[in-house]
Image (tube, rainbow, N blue to C red):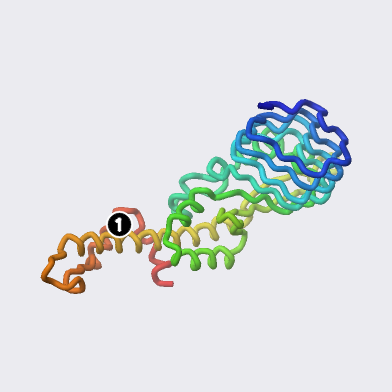
Amino acid sequence: GLEIIGADAFLYCEALQQVTLPSSVTKLGDCAFQGCSSLTKVEFNEGMQIIADLYAFRFCSALRSVTIPSSVTTLGHQTFANCTNLSEVILLGGGRLLNEKFLDRGLFSGQGVLNHRRLNAMVGLKNSDKAHEFAFCGCPLTAIKVSVPGLSDRMARLPQECRPSIEGRIREVSRLELAQNGTILACFPIVIRAPEDEFGQNTIHVQDTDNQTAESLHQVLRLISFHELKESSILIELAVWKSRLFEDQARADCRTSVPGPAKSLIMEYCGFTGFLEPAIEG
């Protein structure tokens, strides 16, 4: 199948409205869709690796939202520059762009949630923090949304009755969103700083200001862990109950609960001690 869409392939095709790129396409050439001013929707598929070195979608003024697949590791120079209506960008490579230790232990990991080096490389700021290098310069973006796949998968594995409380918490806290497909999205503000002198240039940073995103993710992570532990203890109780089931006894007489001290040991073994206490108290 088609693997590369060459440079200038659809340059200033002003009648083009939608594009769906098949999974066989791995690379877009420079200026491939530049100036497609009626383009409202672009669908990338996993398999895309390189979105041009320069200006792939510059001046696509009708674009409002774009989702970048996890297979893309770097966006080229000013990839979506001057897309004057582009107000939402979702990066699906959260497993790479977020710190793994944070997703395991939350704030107790001692790490921030963002892997700044990888995120900067992703959005065109690998070698410079100058605003004109930014893949989305000239767009009305206020934040970048990054998927949190590990957390989303853990929530999906929980019983249905556990999910409303987690979904409710996601909607309550700041800088988190829940996509229609169940993916948890973490939002990171875009901060533009003016130069220190008249000869300097604006700088741009994608960061977790005041650690608000980390705080919110920590709350959700703690709640998911609490439900996981609760479900694990129920399974253990059922296993013990089944092992003591005799034909001449009622089931209610055979069911054995896991004692509190044993549950405490399980929590300690799993690394939940202290981490879950606020969630349990709440």
Q: Residue at 83%, 36% (x, y): give it.
A: 34
- 62 shown above or below 127: below
Q: Amino acid at mark 1?
A: Glu
- 249 shown above or below 150: below
Q: Residue at 73%, 43% (x, y): give it.
A: 42
Viewed as shown, does residue 248 lie left or right of 268?
left
Viewed as shown, does residue 59 lie left or right of 260?
right
Viewed as shown, does residue 75 lie left or right of 37?
left
Residue extending farthest to the front is 247
Give coordinates of residue 114: x percent, y percent. Answer: 57, 47
Disc 1 packing (10 Å; few <14; some 14–19; many ≥20): few
| Screen quadrant of the C terminus | bottom left
Give coordinates of residue 175: x percent, y percent. Answer: 62, 59
Give coordinates of residue 225: x percent, y percent. Answer: 41, 59
Determine which residue is flagged by label 1.
Answer: 268
Q: Is residue 120 visible?
A: yes
Q: Quadrant of residue 49?
A: top right
